[in-house]
Amino acid sequence: MTADQAIAADLAEWRRWHTAARFLFAEAELLDNNQLTEWLTLLSTDIRYVMPVRVSVSRADLEKGVADNYAHYDEDYESLAYRVARVQQPDAHSEAVPSRTRRFVTNVQVSAVTDDRLQVTSYLLLTRSQSVRPDYDQLSAVRYDELALTPEGPKLSSRRIVGDQSVLGLLNLAVFL
Amino acid sequence: MTAPPILRDGTRLADLVDTDARAVSARVLMDAEIFAWEQEQIWQRSWVFVAHETELPEPGDYVVRRIGLDNVIVTREDDGSVHVLLNVCSHRAAELCHAEQGSALRFQCPYHGLAYDRRGRLLGAPAERKMYPGGLDRDTLGLPSADVGSYHGLVFARWTKDGPGLVESLGDFAFYLDMYFGLTAHGWEVAGPPQRWRIPVNWKIPAENFAGDAYHALVTHRSEEYAGRVPRGTMMKSQIGVAVCDPVWGHGGRCTSLRAATAATPAETGALLARLIPGVPAALHPQVEQNLSQDQLELLHSGAAPFLGSVFPNLGFLSASFPRRRGDPLEPGVTIRTWVPLDASTIEFMSWALVQADADERTKVRGRRAIAYSFGSSGTLEQDDSEAWSEIQRNVAGVQGRRRWLRYDSTAQPGRLDEGTGKKWAGPGEIRMGFGTDDNQWNWWLRWLRLMAGDQP
């Protein structure tokens, strides 16, 4: 590999990372700003969106620590779109007074690339402030995403959210991760 | 009477439940002294749901659960029997099992190393002859084990060794549990481990809600109508049904109403069962005819089946059939849940998806997805319940708030005759047809009061 080729490869890698990070940061901003309908436009209509139940197991059983047969979220585009529509109803009590959320997205890595897909891993720390209580509900997770690179820009075509808590500290999951 | 009937400030327990006005003092939701009484009167003396049999498919499998505040190991022996052991070493009170599930043939304490078998018998201690030249007293050092009972896959445990057996304690409600959990040869299995999350609410609020609070759906869940997943009027329709309860044991639930027509042909029966027993594939319907009694089948063929209930003290069950979005086919989902009291103001909510063990894989996958969509941590219905419940808990923390009363004054006379169809209800228990009332929840509270006063049942 010539020096020019090496630079080109670095640049391509950096561009992919930048594409992924920019997408995730912009997505977090939409969710934190309660722009849920706009958030839906970032999703591919064939999305799979799953947050498996986490189990506290011994080291020998680690592969059983992420359930493959029950989930907090087990969604497709239709169900996500419905959740977005419902939670914005004035009588959707869980978010009638919307919680103030902040999604801290870090540790972004592009793990695999095909012509039109990026496999992206990121860490998420969600803080959720509800009502007049000063304490936060928090949730930390790793997300395994697939981004489809389309002419309209990247779309989230798959997300697997692996939370760290086996017992969630949130009143409910009326928020997207 | 084993419970002190008077609280430290002089209030009598009986004064906290106004049986004339059918009201409960809000104080019972937040008072730490009452919570401490409950540890003795409720959680030692009741059959408490701890696990589903299918969470322990193999000998050696275990899950760690709670009965009241006590941490217990639920484990399966080689002979298939299930044992419930205090997860506390008899030596210095260290915890034996840290993982919430796993497989182990014995449990060794990580502190000084005493080891126990799956019946809680002490196997030995490290360097036992040097440390205890006189020998360890194996009889007194075993782990306390609760009595265990199992009903259609539901495993219950109770600490007190005397008192009514599990089936007796289920009372007339067992008939309806049969119609829900005992439909097929291999019954329900858990889809996977439970969702677990914390809600700042007293455990009695969700427990009495599941005994038959249809009323709250009108407003709490009306966003489902406004967002268009279900037609307008669905929540009002859901008020009409049949409340069934056993007022002696405090269990209660709701069934669908009797219909004018009785299913007679196989096609009619098939269509009816598809609606009444969601999650049970048509291929298993012949088993239903074999497993249920004549009275139970008469109810089913007339359109009546349980779809929700609360088994005292803290087991709930529910079936839900909603579309993915408006106009889509109904997707049936089934759940059991328990509300584990952590303190007077906090529960851990545990919610399992159930699927028929003999269903095809596709049906199982759809079932667990459907229930997580509507009920559980992210459920579009249940997330609004958790909001209302946590607000109740905040409200009763205040002096004025806790002096208020929780009201259960909507009531109807029990009756077995359905005036619309002229049919008579074929099941046992106290039956109320039509618009939902507070009677089931009130009966739940009366059982709570009796147990708290030291009476049984």
Image (cartoon, coloured by chain):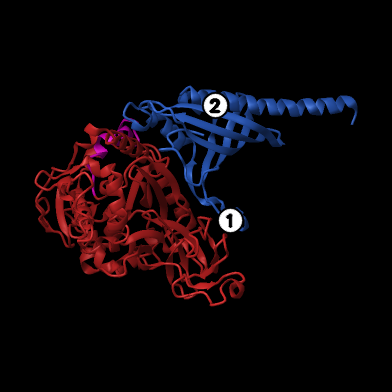
Chain colours: A blue, B red
Q: Is residue B224 within the magenta segment?
A: yes
Which residue is tagged 2?
A28
> Which residue type does callout 2 highlight?
Ala
Residue at coordinates 49% horizontally, 56% vertically from top-left? B361
Q: Nearer the viewer, residue B382 or B346?
A: B346
Determine whether, in the image, residue B360 is placed left or right of residue B322: right
| SS class, disc 1 | loop
| SS class, disc 2 | helix
Identity of the residue furthest to the bottom in this view = B134
- Which residues lie in the magenta part? B212-229
Question: Which disc, if any, is residue A58?
Answer: 1
Residue at coordinates 42% horizontally, 40% vertically from top-left? B378
The N terminus of chain A, quarter of image: top right
Where is residue B277 shown, x and y percent of the image? 32, 56
Figure check: B235 above or below A23? below
The earlier-in-sequence mark between 2 and 1 is 2
> Which residue type does callout 1 highlight?
Ser
- Examine the image and state in which quarter residue A112 appears: top right
- Examine the image and state in which quarter residue B31 appears: top left
- Examine the image and state in which quarter residue A140 appears: top right
